[in-house]
Image (spheres, rainbow, N blue to C red):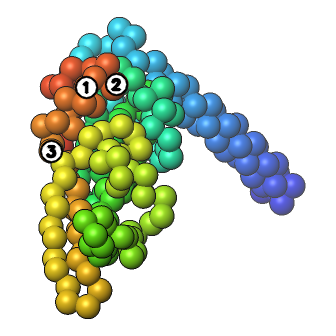
């Protein structure tokens, strides 16, 4: 066997491998598109076959963190599945829409006010809050997204400086679930307390 004949066979094999790789890429693109169409509800396959594909597709879902509640409601109105959680001072809402996981996060404010009583009036000496952007929410008792907060006041008297009023806020999960159902135009049974992950 000559080297020239051997080189020609290697060239043909390289060409075949290149063509197969191109076909594989195109097939992956087509499968991906087909999964998107099937997940959106097109009746190409029955429900039993569709469920594992939905799970496989959702595992590859992209995620987007949204800063404005209006953007979240615009993209997630009518979502099939919504999760919310209250972790410490964080309120988090996630929704799965068309293979994308959207998330909205807002911090629950707590505020500490130092004041003195002077002739029956309160003179505020200082306001202590973690982030100045939270001040409007703390004063309104409502998050920027509009969710009402439960308020608990604790007054601690100090000797020299005056009185300290601490305001702690929390969120009632039952209220949050009803509020989210109204805001997103979905049934409460499609909303659960927990987390959605990609």
Instruction: Judge whether 120 appears above or below 92 on screen.
Output: below
21 left or right of 48?
right
For the N terminus, the image quarter is: bottom right
Tally of numbered discs: 3
Label 1, label 3: how many angstroms apart (C-alpha)? Answer: 14 Å
- The quarter holding residue 42 reads top left
Label 2: state its secondary structure: helix
Q: Is residue 49 visible?
A: no
Label 2, label 1: how many angstroms apart (C-alpha)? Answer: 5 Å
Residue 17: assigned label: none
195 left or right of 97?
left
Q: Position of residue 88 (x, y in %)?
A: 23, 63
The answer to whether marks 2 and 1 mark residues whose Cβ atoms lie closer than 8 Å is yes
The answer to whether marks 1 and 3 mark residues whose Cβ atoms lie closer than 8 Å is no
Instruction: Judge whether 115 appears above or below 161 on screen.
Output: above
Out of 140 and 37, give the one closest to the viewer.
Answer: 140
Residue 181: assigned label: 1
- The quarter holding residue 179 reads top left
Label 3: state its secondary structure: loop
Q: Residue furthest bottom?
A: 160
Q: Residue furthest front?
A: 119
Question: Measuring 40% from the left and 18% from the top, which residue is drawn there?
Answer: 40
Q: Position of residue 34 (x, y in %)?
A: 48, 22
The answer to whether marks 2 and 3 mark residues whose Cβ atoms lie closer than 8 Å is no
Badge 2 is on which residue? 184
Out of 55 and 169, give the one closest to the viewer.
Answer: 169
Badge 3 is on which residue? 172
Q: Earlier in the sequence, mark 1 or mark 3?
A: 3
Out of 175 and 23, give the one closest to the viewer.
Answer: 175
Question: Measuring 28% from the left and 70% from the top, which residue is drawn there?
Answer: 119
Label 2, label 3: how many angstroms apart (C-alpha)? Answer: 18 Å
Q: Earlier in the sequence, mark 2 or mark 3?
A: 3
């Amino acid at each position: 066997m000559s080297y020239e004949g051997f080189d020609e066979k290697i060239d043909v094999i390289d060409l075949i491998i290149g063509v197969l790789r191109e076909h594989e890429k195109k097939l992956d693109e087509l499968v991906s598109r087909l999964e998107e169409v099937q997940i959106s509800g097109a009746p190409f396959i029955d429900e039993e076959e569709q469920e594992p594909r939905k799970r496989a597709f959702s595992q590859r879902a992209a995620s987007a963190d949204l800063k404005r509640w209006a953007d979240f409601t615009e993209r997630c109105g009518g979502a099939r599945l919504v999760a919310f959680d209250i972790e410490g001072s964080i309120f988090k809402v996630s929704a799965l829409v068309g293979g994308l996981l959207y998330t909205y996060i807002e911090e629950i404010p707590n505020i500490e006010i130092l004041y003195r009583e002077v002739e029956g009036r309160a003179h505020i000496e200082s306001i202590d809050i973690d982030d100045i952007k939270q001040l409007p929410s703390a004063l309104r008792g409502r998050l920027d997204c509009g969710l009402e907060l439960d308020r608990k006041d604790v007054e601690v008297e100090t000797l020299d400086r005056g009185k300290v009023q601490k305001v702690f806020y929390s969120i009632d999960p039952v209220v949050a679930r009803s509020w989210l159902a109204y805001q997103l135009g979905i049934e409460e049974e499609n909303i659960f307390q927990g987390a959605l992950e990609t």
